[in-house]
Image (cartoon, coloured by chain):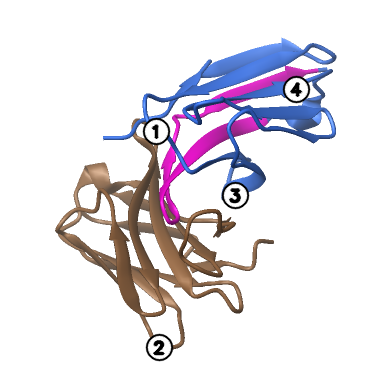
Amino acid sequence: TQLLEQSPQFLSIQEGENLTVYCNSSSVFSSLQWYRQEPGEGPVLLVTVVTGGEVKKLKRLTFQFGDARKDSSLHITAAQPGDTGLYLCAGDSQGGKLIFGQGTELSVKP
Amino acid sequence: DSGVTQTPKHLITATGQRVTLRCSPRSGDLSVYWYQQSLDQGLQFLIQYYNGEERAKGNILERFSAQQFPDLHSELNLSSLELGDSALYFCASSVASGSGNTIYFGEGSWLTVV
């Protein structure tokens, strides 16, 4: 069974701080996706990483895929209250069958 | 707005009952996915359809079934409901079925079983 372990589960920080969320697995994924979900809404795709070692940047968010394509990280620089939400990593194991991590609940306080 | 439409948004029903959740995928998307999100289990893949045919199956209970119709909309049927079935059920769609396709999620259907 493929599992994705996400850490930390909860993160409460002050505006302007940096943070990193980790997503780890013992399985190899063809790609890994990061989503953000707000209350009452469905997950929204932030980025997809495909190649081992790949780094993608989305404004203040930096996503990295591990060399072995088993893990990934999301780094947010100078977090803002608008970054508050549930961040989910998901591994693509079989043509769209996404395996989701448990999520990281981020709270950024002004 | 992802373009994926789910109805109903909220549903309260009693144990033992049966409900049907409906999903209209984004225009042009052939693949539909169903996911269940609960506090203790997180987001769990249930089932995927592609152009009317079942493509992949996940942790879907035998009491649950789904189908995708010729017009590509999909329904998830949940029967003999139990308290533990209370969850947020998401439908998602993508253009194709292979790896790397962007999947768009609807806003979900909140099911409460009392």
**Mark number, residue A41:** 3
Residue labelled with disc 2: B70
Q: Is residue A27 above or below residue B22?
A: above
Q: Image quarter for residue A57?
A: top right
Cα gap from disc 4 to disc 1, whole angstroms: 25 Å
Q: Are marks 3 and 1 on the same chain?
A: no
**Mark number, residue B39:** 1
Residue labelled with disc 4: A76
Per the image, is A84 magenta? no
- Residue lying furthest bottom in this view? B70
Residue stretch in magenta? A85-109
Mark 4 and mark 1 residues within 8 Å of each other at the beta carbon: no
Q: Chain of mark 4?
A: A
Q: Earlier in the sequence, mark 4 or mark 3?
A: 3
Q: Colour of chain B?
A: brown
Q: How many circles with numbers are drawn on the protein?
A: 4
Q: Image quarter for residue B65?
A: bottom left
